[in-house]
Image (spheres, rainbow, N blue to C red):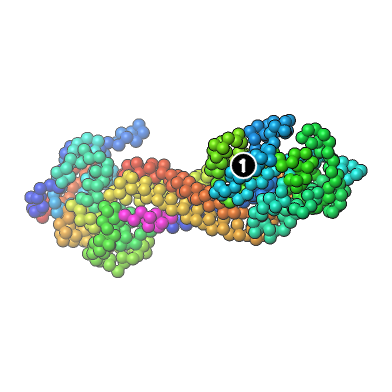
Amino acid sequence: MNILKLALRGLMRNRRRSLVTLLAIALGFSAIALFAGYTHNVYDGMARGAIHSEMLGHLTLSKRGMRKEGKLDPQRYLLTANEVAAITGLLKDEPHVEMIAPRLALSGLVSNGRASTIFIAEGIEPTAMERLQRDVLNEREKQSGLYDNLMKHLDPAHSEVVELSEGLVEMLHLSIGGQAAVLVNTLSGQANALDISVGHSFNTGNAGSNDKFAFVSLALAQSLLDAEGRADRLTILLDDMLQTGAMRARLSEKLRAAGFDIEIMTWQELSDFYNQVHGMFDMIFGFIFSIVLTVVVMSVANSMGMTVVERTREIGTLRAIGLKRKGVVRLFTAESMLLTLIGCTVGLLITLGVRWGINLANISYTPPNSASPVPLLVDMDYWRILFTFALMGAVGTLAAYLPARRAANQAIIDALGHV
Amino acid sequence: MNDNTSHPPILKLRNVRRRFQLGETTIDALNSISLDIHAGEFLAVWGPSGSGKSTLMNIIGLIDTPTAGKVHFDKQDTCVLADDELTEFRSRKIGFVFQNFNLVPVLSALENVMLPLQIQGVAEHAARRRAAAVLVDVGLERFKGSLPDKLSGGQRQRVAIARALVVEPMLVIADEPTANLDSGNSRMVIDLMREMNRARKVTFVFTTHDPRLLDHVDRKILLRDGDIASDEVLQ
């Protein structure tokens, strides 16, 4: 018996009911797919932000204990010039390694001559900074114009030129090209002051750091800390984000074999904000998914329950002329599966249409703790769409199982006598 | 004397009882019925409402099981068969015609007739060919693409007869096949069943209220209060 043909015809009997159920499935599916697409875009943007804008790279190498004890005993935990050169030489030809950049963090006071405030700075080679930021924006984000002030630039020819966050420039009434002075403690604890010039300002994208952060050339940082050739860590940029975990294991093994006691952290481990937002969105997604799935199951179960009751006499007839109990169950679950799959397909089409509209509308919003608006964009999260399709299909099919089994187990004479 | 009684019985009922429990009330629908039905018979079961006609038909049609007694169909004790075995057995040996036609409304006349064959697993093209041939036999070849709601009551019952015959059963059970038809269509349906009985050597057992239709049968069994009041073989 062609179960699917019979199931499809069955769906056409009560078209209004089938349509309402189908719409419930389709709208539920599209709600999940659109939210998944939105979070996918957020995760992707945040991952690129962490790797390329925060300049965490994919992997960060430092002496074991640097993260916990390095601030208290920098002499002990900073990498020496020889170590930096040896590790760079050892790893630069590894597959997927695009760049290894020494880094040196520092903090102190910055002054305009009349007032001063604290700053936190990152020392990095200007060319490494350019390379790290190269992939920070995708084409759509570049076109949005919302990230024009995101990029940071240091001048390779002038190490005294620094990049200050917009809030810092504003607070100290500095101007681009203007002069300021920074005061820092050297590694040995002595005060060291140097004049700087403001090359450019940037938006950190975070309200908490937009009035404190600065980028300086690695040479200037080493000079301010009196730490020639030294670095507190090495940032490694890979050519493929998906290789992060594998490369950490591979490089750790290689460094251990070469006698280095080095700790390697991934960008995900270092980016608390990414992890927190990811966790929060995953929880919201799970919540929405559960609600939508419940609504879909209830709709399908209700629709199929009514269908089974209305067709009880037909079930009796089919049983009398030779359809086995499991055949009855198969018939109604096929009908339910067909309804769910058609609903999900319509939901996918709605998703494509709404996504197209949202992405075309140039909508922007300011997320919590953000210093600037970001575009509202929706991606296609193919894995979660596939997962939703499969799960809804399975659950929608099973929703018909109980009423169908109940009908199949009914005595034939009772079913035939049903009014 | 009807020649068919000389044939071995295809169905034997021995001391069949059927009791229904409706809450506190116990209803004895059949009281120790014993009956043989022979191959090729054209048999009517008649009697007043509540006499047990439909209950007897359900038991003969193997869609109900007796509370006590034995039912042997084609030498098989049907009471020992599991549900799936019984369903399989029934689908190959018995055809059904219902009072309300019980056609699947979303299937065409041809598809309705194909249905029992497809349930048996017959390939679609073979089922289509066999169903079309039976529709020709019942005079509905022109309506094979019509949905049931586009057919008259008489035409629907002819489709139901075709559906019952398409599996080439030993026995066709028809419970009040003319109850929803006017007298002209009732006569036509009984004539058609009779024609199929003779042409295909298929045993027909049907119930009716209409005494005029009893003139056309080989044998008539009168039921009263769950017992056989008379079993008359006609010339």
- A109 above or below B131? above
Q: Which image quadrant is residue B97 in?
A: bottom left
- A285 above or below A354? above
- B187 above or below B25? below
Quadrant of the frame with the N terminus of chain A: bottom left
x, y percentage for residue A352?
56, 58
Q: Is residue B234 left or right of residue A368?
A: left
x, y percentage for residue A105?
73, 40
Q: Which image quadrant is residue A255 in?
A: top right
Q: Is residue B87 visible?
A: yes
**Secondary structure at numbered mark 1:** helix
x, y percentage for residue A361?
67, 60
A363, A321: nearer the viewer: A363
Q: Which residue shows up at 13% across the image and 49% down it?
A: B38
* Label total for image: 1
Q: Mark 1 highlights which residue?
A: A87
Q: Which residue shows up at 30% across the image and 62% down it?
A: B110
Amino acid type of the residue that numbered disc 1 sits on in the rendered structure: Ile
The residue stretch that appears in magenta = A1-11
Q: Which image quadrant is residue A287 in?
A: top right
Q: Hey, which residue is sitting farthest front in the picture?
A: A82
x, y percentage for residue A201?
79, 51
Chain assignment, label 1? A
